[in-house]
Image: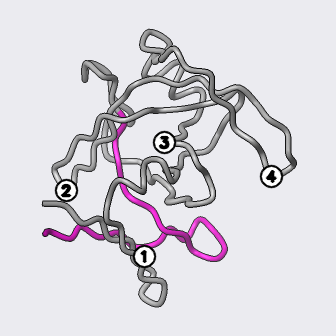
């Protein structure tokens, strides 16, 4: 088993676990970001798959062309529920040379980029708090 690691993001207080990724459409014709990677927050408090900003979902990747016929909702900490747009999409982890077909989700005015339990529970991910390091284990 190979281990691919990233330092926690200092953009959060306290620092938070992330995985550096690229998002792609199911046909791999569009990607975001176009150069480099984007930090995907590891968030076991979110029960969905992969939540991305609505501007990335709607404009950068045009995932409205790939909407899944499901009714899904996100419940905010305030208790308010909002409908989710759900699409098939690919999460690429360049460091691990992996492309994972999964569900990409968003809601109106979403600005978050995070991996929820439905995505995380499929993989071995180590959180080393004292070292502030996230490691993804893959074959």
- Residues packed near mark 2 inside 10 Å, few (<14), some (14 to 19) or many (20 plus): some
Q: Residues within 10 Å of mark 1 (few under 14, many from 20)?
A: some
Of mark 2 and mark 3, the one earlier in the sequence is: 3
Q: Nearer the viewer, mark 1 or mark 2?
A: 1
Q: Which mark is residue 127?
A: 1
Q: Is residue 7 magenta?
A: yes
Above or below, comparing residue 104 to residue 41 in the picture: above
Q: Marks 1/2: CA distance?
A: 17 Å
Residue occupying the point 51% across, 53% down: 117
109 displayed left or right of 79: left
The magenta-colored residue range is: 1-23
Q: Earlier in the sequence, mark 1 or mark 2?
A: 2
For residue 75, above or below residue 45: above
Q: Which residue is mark 4?
A: 77
Q: Nearer the viewer, mark 2 or mark 3?
A: 3
Q: Which mark is residue 50?
A: 3
* Residue 80 spot, x, y in % from top left: 85, 39
Residue sticking out furthest to the bottom: 130
The spot of residue 92 in percent (x, y) is 28, 42
Callout 1–callout 4 Cβ contact below 8 Å:
no
Residue depicted at x 27% and y 40%: 100
Question: Which quadrant does the C terminus fall into?
Answer: bottom left
Q: How far, Cα to Cα, is label 4 from label 2? A: 33 Å
- The quarter of the picture where residue 82 lies is top right
Image mark count: 4
Tell which circle, 1 or 4, labels the residue nearer the N-terminal end.
4
- Give how far apart the Cα atoms at labels 1 and 3 are: 18 Å
């Amino acid at each position: 088993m190979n281990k691919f690691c990233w330092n926690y993001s200092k953009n959060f207080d306290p620092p938070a676990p992330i995985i550096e990724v690229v998002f792609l459409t199911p046909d791999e014709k569009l990607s975001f970001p176009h150069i480099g990677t984007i930090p995907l927050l590891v968030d076991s408090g979110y029960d969905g798959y992969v939540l991305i900003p609505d501007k990335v979902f709607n404009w950068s990747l045009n995932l409205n062309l790939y909407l899944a016929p499901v009714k899904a909702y996100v419940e905010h900490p305030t208790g308010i529920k909002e409908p989710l747009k759900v699409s098939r999409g690919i999460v690429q982890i360049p460091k691990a040379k992996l492309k994972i077909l999964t569900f990409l989700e968003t809601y109106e005015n979403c600005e978050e980029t995070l991996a929820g339990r439905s995505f995380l529970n499929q993989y071995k991910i180590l959180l080393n708090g004292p070292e502030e390091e996230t490691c993804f284990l893959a074959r």
